[in-house]
Image (cartoon, rainbow, N blue to C red):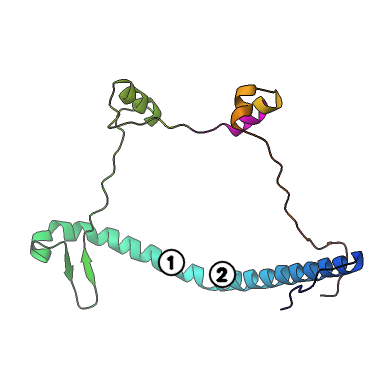
Amino acid sequence: MSVIYKEPKTRAEIEAEADEIAKIRIKIRKLTVARDAAILKINEQYNPQIKALDAEREARENALAPFVSARKAELMGKNKSASSPLSMYGFRTGQTVVRNITGKPDAAVAYELFDAARSDCAKATYSLDKSGIKKALKNGDAHIGDLFEMEVVERFYVEPKTDKDIGE
C-alpha cells in the first residue's frame, strides 16, 4: 500500500494520483462482486436445506408444545424446563408487551392521555421540520434566520470513469 508522502505540485501529478485512486476503486468493485457471487453461491447451496430443516423444527416444536403444556407438572415440576438425553425443553417467558385495546390509533390514545394530564403514560415529542426551515430561510424569515443557517457541504471524491478501460 502506498500513500502520498509529498504534495503533488503539478496537474499531471494530481491526475496521476486520482487515476491510481480510480484503479483502487475498480479493484474494490471487482473484489466485492466476486465476494458477493461466492456468498450467493454458498447461500443457494445451503439455504434450501436450512429452510427445510427450520420448517420441520418449527412444525415439530408447535406440535409438541400442547402435549408438554398438558403434562407440565409431571414433566417439569416447578421448573420452567426439563431435559431429555439430547435436549432441554420448556417454556420461555417473553417480555411484557403493552397492547392498545381501544381500537383507536396509538397517537389518538396518547393525545387523550396527555390531554387528561396523564403525562406518566403519554409524552409529547417534537422534531424539526428541516424542509420547512429551509423554506423559511429562503423566504428571509428573520426569526428562523437567528436560529439556523443553510450550508452546502463539499466532500472530495475520486470516481473511476466507467467508459475507460484502465487495464485492471
Counting residues from the start of the chain, the first of labels 1 and 2 encountered is: 2
- The percent position of residue 32, horizontal first and vertical second, equals 67, 69
- The percent position of residue 134, horizontal first and vertical second, equals 66, 31
Does the magenta-highlighted stretch encompass residue 76?
no
Q: Main secondary structure of the magenta part?
A: helix
Judged by depth in the image, the label closer to the viewer, 1 or 2, is 2
Q: Quadrant of the N terminus?
A: bottom right
Reading the image, the residue beneath label 2 is 44
Q: Which residues are magenta?
A: 127-135
Measured along the vertical axis of the image, is residue 115 above or below residue 97?
above
What numbered label is drawn on residue 72?
none
Residue 141 shows in the view = yes
Please name whichever residue, 166 or 89, is drawn nearer the observer in this view of the structure: 166
Indicate left or right for 21 with 101 as reference: right
Tell me the kind of residue under disc 1.
Ala
Please name whichever residue, 166 or 80, is drawn nearer the observer in this view of the structure: 166
